[in-house]
Image (tube, rainbow, N blue to C red):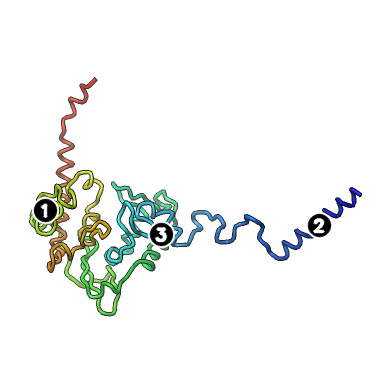
Amino acid sequence: MIARLQIGLTASVGLAITLLAGCSARLPGQPNEAERWRATAEITDFNQLYTQNCAGCHGAGGRVGAARPLNDPLYLAFVTDDAMRQAISTGRAGTNMPAFSEQAGGHLTDQQIELIVNGMRAHWSKPDDFKGVDIPGYSVNETATTSGPSEAVNNNNISAETSQAGDATRGSATYKTFCASCHGTNGEGGSAGSIVDPNFLNLVSDQGLRTTVVVGRADLGKPDWRGNVPGHPMSAQEISDVVAWLAARRKMTTVAVSKVDHSTCLNMK
């Protein structure tokens, strides 16, 4: 009797396995293809790449994070693809932006970095919003860009005069015209707080300052280069000059700190 039960049970299990294999049924808890674990280098979905590598600082969906929002059509019209690739690949020295490329010690392949750049463009750009707008060049060495009636904004197009190197002396007057109403007469604080705080200036590059002056920070209520003074957008020269003035404040702070006499500290018990 027992032998018959064992034979019957074995046959039933064998039949069940055969049927499951034949109909490709999913066993309970078995992941589907989308849920299957993949090595980091195999991930090709933009949303997953962004969420795992960028959202921690730049916010879910590119908004409301500690760092600059990337889901900003004006920022995406301003920044070049090469600049984004470089920032992702090698990071930003002196800031909290790390390097993500495998060559720089990160874990993203060149293809994945390209997917992130292209994904931000595809999901968040609105080039039609800036047709006919003269957007200042991304860096001081680039020209401003104009998007004509039928072309998308592209910072690789040359269509306006070159931005000149900044002058800190002129930048002082420029600051008072465009920035002092929010940041105070000397930049030390107003409704928008200090813009010469060493903790800020020592964590932001000159390019970061330029980007903020041109693009603004909509999430913080900071207007772009067109909105500081109604009817008077900042010129390329004025942008470069105020960045030079801010950068000079950083250097003055660094020098002041380096000249502190530490001899008394050595005598402390």
Q: Nearer the viewer, residue 192 or 197?
A: 192
Q: Nearer the viewer, residue 90 or 96?
A: 96
Kindly identify which residue carries mark 2: 12
Label number found at residue 113: 3
Residue 80 coordinates in the image, percent (x, y): 30, 64
The answer to whether mark 2 and mark 1 are in CB contact below 8 A is no
Q: Nearer the viewer, residue 56 or 85?
A: 56
Task: Label 3: state its secondary structure.
Answer: helix
Residue 81 coordinates in the image, percent (x, y): 33, 64
What's under tag 3, amino acid-wise?
A: Ile
Residue 267 lies in quadrant: top left
Query: How many angstroms separate mark 3 from mark 2 (CA)?
Result: 52 Å
Q: Quadrant of the C terminus?
A: top left
Residue 113 coordinates in the image, percent (x, y): 41, 59
Kindly identify which residue carries mark 1: 168
Query: How many angstroms separate mark 1 from mark 3 (CA)?
Result: 36 Å
* For marks 2 and 1 on the same chain, the one whose residue lies earlier in the sequence: 2
Callout 1: 10 Å neighbours few (<14), some, many (20+)?
A: many
| Identity of the residue drawn at 25% across and 47% down | 203
Q: Does residue 209 appear left or right of residue 16 in this picture?
A: left
What's under tag 1, amino acid-wise?
A: Ala
